[in-house]
Image (tube, rainbow, N blue to C red):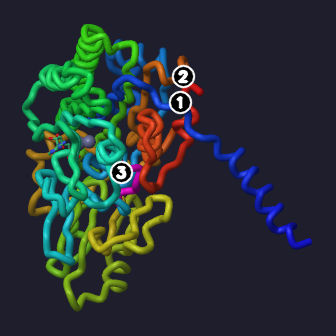
Amino acid sequence: MKCFPALLGLLLCGLLAACSTPPPPAASGPVILISIDGFRWDYLQRHDAPTLRALAAGGVHATRLSPSFPSKTFPNHYTLVTGLYPQNHGIVANWFYDPADNAKFDMSKTEARWWQGGEPIWITAEKQGVRSACFFWPGSESVNRGIRPTFFKHFDHKMPSADRVDGLLAWLALPAAQRPRLATLYFDIVDTQGHTFGPLAPETGAAVKEVDAAVARLLAGLERLGLRETANLVIVSDHGMSECPPDKVVFFEDLMDISQVRVEANGPNGGVRPKPGVDVAALVAHIRAKAPPAIKVYRREDVPARLHYSRGESIPPIMLIADDHWTIEERSRWTPAWAATSKATHGWDPATPNMGALFLANGPAFKQHVELPDVANIHVYDLLCALLGVKPAPNDGDQRLARAALRR
Ligand code: AMP
Ligand code: ZN
Ligand code: ZN
């Protein structure tokens, strides 16, 4: 009788082991993670992208990669490389306020203090003896617990896409002992043109074509270096893009007395921090009464659980979350002239179809001709770890993408 619990334990262990199949073996060539900022999931068919289309068709393609909330650049790039929701890695927006230190974050901030939440893939790799190289990626210019990528570049928005590819190829051309095994590459032109002209504009189509040509240039370079056969490419974007017409703009000033708050987020989601002494419950009720149905108003702790956006003082205590196409702005800062130069944006609920992002993967470690259903971007980190054969740091994702995409 005594050994019955032990026997049961053994049986349970066996069952659990069978359910959690170990990840597939690591690949040997370079693992290249490419981000095409603002590449909406359907651009692959809607715009001219022959190289990307061929890689998707021959490898693994997910219908849509779901971003994490808010569907902005910095939170999502850091989610892709840490597997953590923004509330858990701490980059909760492109710009935010840290009341504990009375400090402001924006996209130019590379000081280590902002980038300590979670472990980006290049740190996981370096800690386990895998060399990494980042040709741009939010957070890659920072030190994480004393470690940084072996190679990295300070971000330069103006650098042409082809030069970024050539820079990465120069690192991959190093002798095997110095060559990185994990590389990141980042393109911003598709996002920039999407904002200015709209997702389906010819100018955005031309940007897609430019990046497609840059990926073709990378493939040709890998071929020259003898790395094409062993390289595994994971190509993602951070979010989609959707029109924000001027007749769907709501002004903070029409919803509340803004002298009572500090406005900390605008666009597809607004965020305000009530000043000391303000009755928060009364203010929320007031904003709710004034807001149109397209805007939902929440106290931070009541933001729907599926958005994972309730934890941490940097998230504004009152969130105004708009439906697709609607935005919330300060009247004093918004002008029709500015709106005319900004046709589209992103930041909406990840479940909004237009916020869907890109996921495709191709290389010897990947299955061929596989279409996957929508997948959340928290699972990309574990996939990269499986490709590199390194142990992932604790994160919000799991092995589902690795299992679905990798050959056994
Ligand atoms: P968003 O406002 O969310 O559309 O942000 C996109 C912009 O982020 C791009 O146009 C880039 O200029 C900027 N960006 C992307 N990566 C970096 C980086 N590593 N450092 C600074 N800015 C960046
Ligand atoms: Zn972006
Ligand atoms: Zn953008």
Mark 3 or mark 1, whichever is nearer to me: 1
Q: Amino acid at mark 2?
A: Lys
Q: Residue at x 53, y 30 (%)?
A: 405
Please indicate whether residue 316 sits to the left or right of residue 57 in the image: left
Magenta stretch: residue 82 in it?
yes
- Of label 2 and label 1, which has the lower sequence position? 2
Assess whether mark 1 and mark 2 are in contact (beta carbons under 8 angstroms): yes
Distance (Cα) linking label 2 and label 3: 32 Å
Quadrant in which ligand 3 is drawn: top left
Residue 136, percent from left and from top: 19, 37
**Is 401 placed above or below 281 here?**
above
**Residue where numbered disc 2 is placed:** 367
**Residue where numbered disc 3 is placed:** 348
Distance (Cα) linking label 2 and label 1: 6 Å
Question: Residue pushed farthest bottom?
Answer: 277
Would residue 61 be visible to someone looking at this image? yes
Label 3: few (<14), some or many (≥20) within 10 Å?
Answer: many
Q: Element type at marker 3?
A: loop
